[in-house]
Image (tube, helix red, strand yellow):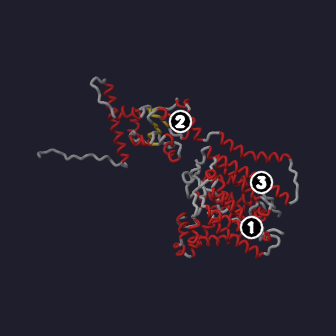
Amino acid sequence: MQPKPFMNPYFAGFLLGLVLLTTIYITGRGLGASGGTKSVVAALVKTISPSHYANTNYYQQSEAEHPGSPLKSWLLFEIIGVFIGAFVSGVISDRVSLKLEKGPKVRNTTRIIAAITGGLLFGFGSQLGRGCTSGSALSGMAVMSFGGIITMLAIFGGAYMLAYFFRKLWINN
Amino acid sequence: MGPLVPDIISNEFNFMVALLVGIAFGFVLEQAGFSTTKKLVGLFYGYDFTVLKVFFTAGVTAMIGVILLAHWGLLDLEMIYVNPTFLRSALIGGLIMGAGFIIGGFCPGTSICAVATGKIDAFWFIAGSLVGIFFFMEAYPLLSNFYIADNMGNLRMDKFLGISKEWFAISLTAMAILAFYFTQKIQNNLQGIKPVYPKQRIIKYSLFAILPFAIIAFIMITPDSKQRILNKANTFENQHAAKEINADKLVVELANNYYKINLVDVRSPEKFKEYHLPLAINIPLDSMLNREWQKEFTQNYKTNVFYADDSIDTRKAYVIANNISDADTYILSESTSQFKYLILNIDPLSNTASKNEQQLHQYRTDMARIIMELDFRLKNQLQPEKKQTKKVKGGCS
């Protein structure tokens, strides 16, 4: 089956803005993503090595924010929702299929190594920058946060600066 | 008034909200095309600016929505979370994320959408990000000084630039629209096409571009909800209809049903400290619209009674309360000093007093005693008043 076309980007952006606005109105906070992943990491560490978890400063900070279990985190529930919502949308528009997407001249192993490396950097950077594209840049813009907008400029600026060097991962020339 | 958490929606139910808004978030991201690296990376090679269009439209929509809700008094800007600014870590963290974006092709939110639609590369991206987060947590002791450097607090752009929220919103919206226009040109040039847009479409898009400015102009021109209430309070017409209760009625209500009466002193805290009526609480007139006080006089099972030194202040308080609360509201006919003179520091009766005057005198004395005792007991956490016990004297000693 042919996948359905994507939504008009401005309309999608408007809807996304309304979702974000609703979230701020109800909860007083914005959307996010990397914070949910962080809870998973904290939970894994707590399960695998409780003594290490108890002795490490950063985990204890996160423990204080989510007393009981690292998994009792607002953002983790939210990203589970994101997964469900994206899956439903994909099913409706016939876009769900197992595949490895990559640039035209890229081998599968290269793509996987690049994906892992990119994830690693993004994960690390999101902790240092206190949030990723969703939690810091987008939600930050909605509440006019100075730090959020700085992070947004740095993310997109950084990607543009490096785009030339990694062009072979994505395009022909 | 928003945010609804934690006063109206509990922190536990908030997890359910998280799941629901997450579903909506994921659905829109996927519909926009954020589940494929082809769309996401297109931004950096100039062949597809979807990300920019979606991202900026969403940001501008939510931002204008936030100030509009605040303008209508539906959202308290002081209560919502503003991401704190730590300049160095925000910049360096952002640059590292930028590198991760161009190498991995996703950001965390979009990688979840992509894996939900079966992208194997997104699975590896997520695996990598778990490791990256783990590295950060383990390396935190080494990074902590850098992490907390240049703390600028919950700084907002408008404050940083020294302009109003509205002007910042106008600037950002204008920047977004210019970016939309020029990136479309770049994209068309790269693809070597010279599209001719139908006139209707140009008109439609122009109207959508004007709409945000119209909303911001509306916010700038019209008084906000607080200002509207204050304006009403300051206009004389509204001050005739105030429901009044006089001192004698109030004391009997207080004596019998003090728990149903919310006696509010709207004078300054200094004056309140100096002297106030028994059982009164203090909410200064100029802070009545502050969130922390609103709960006090919006309790539907209590009747508000306002008093002050002059009747204009009392009536202002009455108008304000009536505008934000459904609770039954009265003003005390007497001023603070009149009440004190009539009820509490009552003059001894002259010998020529009529029977009526004697009765009234007795009544006021009794009521004053009861409410002073109530006041004392409530202040002492409902402990019964300590009576001086005197040894019974009698017998033969």
Neighbour tally class for label 3: few under 14, some 14-19, many 20 plus, Cα within 10 Å: some
**Does mark 2 fall on the same chain as mark 3?**
yes
Cα separation, mark 2 vs mark 1, equals: 61 Å
- Quadrant position of the C terminus of chain A in the picture: bottom right
Observer-side mark, 3 or 1, equals 1
Q: Nearer the viewer, residue B68 or A148?
A: A148
What residue type is disc 3 on?
Phe
Question: Which residue does the numbered mark 3 point to in the structure image?
Answer: B180
From the top left corner, tell me how far across and down residue A127 is, in percent.
62, 66
Dot 2 falls on a residue whose secondary structure is helix
- Return the x and y of residue A107 as percentages of the image width and height: 79, 75
Residue type highlighted by circle 2 = Val
Label 3: element kind? helix
Contact, mark 3 vs mark 1 (Cβ under 8 Å): no
Q: Is residue B110 above or below residue B320?
A: below
Q: Which residue is mark 1?
A: A162
- Residue B319: mark in rendering: 2
Q: Is residue A59 left or right of residue B221?
A: left
Query: Can residue B299 be spotted in the picture?
Result: yes
Q: Report how far apart the C-alphas of labels 3 and 2 lie in the structure.
A: 48 Å
Q: Which SS class for mark 1? A: helix
